[in-house]
Image (tube, rainbow, N blue to C red):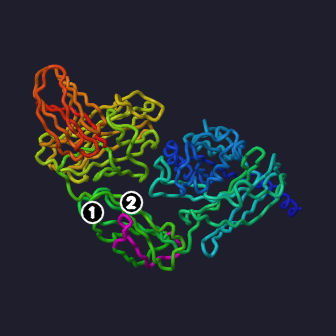
Amino acid sequence: MKKSTLSFCFLITCLAVFSQTPRLSLYEEFTGENCPPCASANPPLNLLLASPTNTPKIVAIKWQVPIPSAPSNTWSLYQTNKVEIDWRWKTLASGGYGYTPAINSAPSSKIDGQEASVFGASSGHPANLNNNVISSAAAVPSEFSINMTRAWNQAYSAVNLTVNIQATQSFSATGNLIFRLVMIERHVHFVTAPGTNGEKDFEDVAVKSFPTLQNGTPMTAGTWSVGQTQTFTINCPLPSYIRDKSEIAFVGFIQDDGNQKVAQAGLANSEGLSNDAKAVSAFVPNLSCTNTIDPDVTIKNNGNNGITNFTITPYIDGIIKPIFSWSGNLAVGASTTMAIGSISVSGGSHTFSYNISAVSGTDNNLVNNSATTKFVTISNYQTTPIVEGFTSTFPPLKWSTFNTTSGPSWVKSTSCGGFGLSSESTKMDFYTYAAGTINELILPPINLAGVITPTLTFDLAYATYANEADKLEVFVSDDCGDNWTNVYDKSGTNLNTAPATTSPFVPSAAQWRNESVNLFGYSNPSILLKFVATSAYGNNLYIDNVNLSQLNPVGVFSTPLSNINIEVFPNPTSGDVNLTVNSINNSNYRINLINSLGQVIFEKNFNFSIGINNIQIETKQYPEGIYNVVLESNNTKTTKKITIIK
């Protein structure tokens, strides 16, 4: 009798266990490499999903959709898997899975195939996912359990996955019941952002599905009884575009295609390889004032065996430098940071990179053996004026750009120039770049010895999108970048030169302003200057006619004269240029014509009478380019830019 009672109790216990299977919810994010809000939303989303409280409750797949546009690079996360990604987010009419409601924006999401609002979120935007929403989704009991085990093949070129599914409650599907298996990379790092939003770190990226995402593995039945099982093995070859084998994991889920609901999800997490030396990072100071650098590199033993030796091959701008050999004992999971010796460099912008080879016991994961960083070396400080209209290659000679994301930065614009006098300038694309993105535009190093009142001037155009606080700052350093002083700081409406617009801003001739920054008072005349642009995801900013003045000549700066007005025509010109000067008194003036190197190529004094004065300057003997006409009297100046064409 006790035995029968025990058996009955055991049966009840088993049924109770079956009926209370914990749910691992599936979070599908539809994000994109060209999507600025995605770059802002993903870092906090990743922290939330990785919380120890949430990892037993939810697993993620990130689909890199072409919203608002597709990256053009063939190796981007979208382009390498576009067929499956397009099918997952597109409507039925467009040949896709046909999620309802449709996926029409990024970033957005589905939780277990449903809208996030079903579980208490105000919308499917990742910013509205929180611990309560995750717990609410996980609290819905599942009718299935999923167990997945994985094993590398001998060559580490494929993973064999065994899937065991068991019904813990009776279940009837409304449509085809499909098991879908998606290979993901838990973390992907790019040196240069693959898209336009500056995002270079991605997590839980959908890589490839097996056997296919569209068909999946059909379940043996649409109606399941308690205890019913299905077991199968899937071979998963690694695609050629895998970034790091050690980051490969698998997300499997059971989906009822009749109502699109996901009944249960499972995770086969990433696993190490037997031998794997990983290049974690490369470090060189952003700015260096010597002709040598001393790089530090960090190497991790990412495999399951100890490492006793390897070789590091460093490169400067792709050119091999002296090889460094290491020997010792790097334990499993341990990292070491080492100096690999001094390397000679020239002045200017450079890329430092290195590659690991000759690893003891071989290396089963060569795709993570390299790391890269960028830096600028200051070899000398020029004494000639800085006069730049951004008319040639970009960045201009001796200029450089820098940002912490290694993504898109300052670019050359051919759609507008200062006050409409040319069609060229430099542009900061706040309209596209994610909020918080910081980009620097570094001027050539300059020595201001003997300059009485050094002045930086530049033409500026900006319009906010709505009320975003996009920011432009100017910093100066007289100790080769060890310390920087802010000498100009404007943001939001204080930066505006035009009304707000929701279209990408391109200024008219009247939508420019000339800015002037006093650089007087630095004890060391050798200085560095940089423009620093911080995005609030607002609208475009343009800079043109950057001038750093010196004495005799002082470069070019625009301080409008109160008693005179000057017009220049024709502009552009292929012959002579005419100046019409309207003076309100009788005065003596000097007119200079200055080329892009800051050289005075024409100088003449004039006596102006009250009213209209006409002057002609012959320019046909000068090369094509951008020139500045400077009208000067009594320590005040006004400048007009002209373009000479042939």
Q: Secondary structure at mark 1?
A: loop
Q: Could you tell me the amino acid type at mark 1?
A: Ser
Determine the residue positioned at 35% across, 41% down.
424
Is 308 in the magenta? Answer: yes
Q: Magenta segment, principal secondary structure?
A: strand
Residue 626 visible in the displayed image: yes
Is 358 inside the magenta-drawn segment? no
Of labels 2 and 1, earlier in sequence is: 1
Instruction: Looking at the picture, tell me which residue is in the foreground, 276 or 597.
Output: 597
* Left or right of residue 361, residue 490 in this image: left
Residue shown at the point (14%, 47%) measured from the top left: 523
Q: Compute the Cα span from label 2 to label 1.
A: 16 Å
Measured as percent of width and height from the top left, residue 213 is found at 70, 55
In the image, taking residue 307 as reference, residue 324 lies left or right, namely left
Is residue 106 toward the left or the right of residue 92 in the image?
A: left
Where does the magenta region start and end? Answer: 302-321
Residue 373 — which label? 2
Residue 114 rendering spot, x and y as whole percentages:
69, 42
At which x and y percent is residue 517?
A: 23, 37
Q: Which mark is residue 346?
A: 1
Question: Which image quarter: residue 631?
Answer: top left
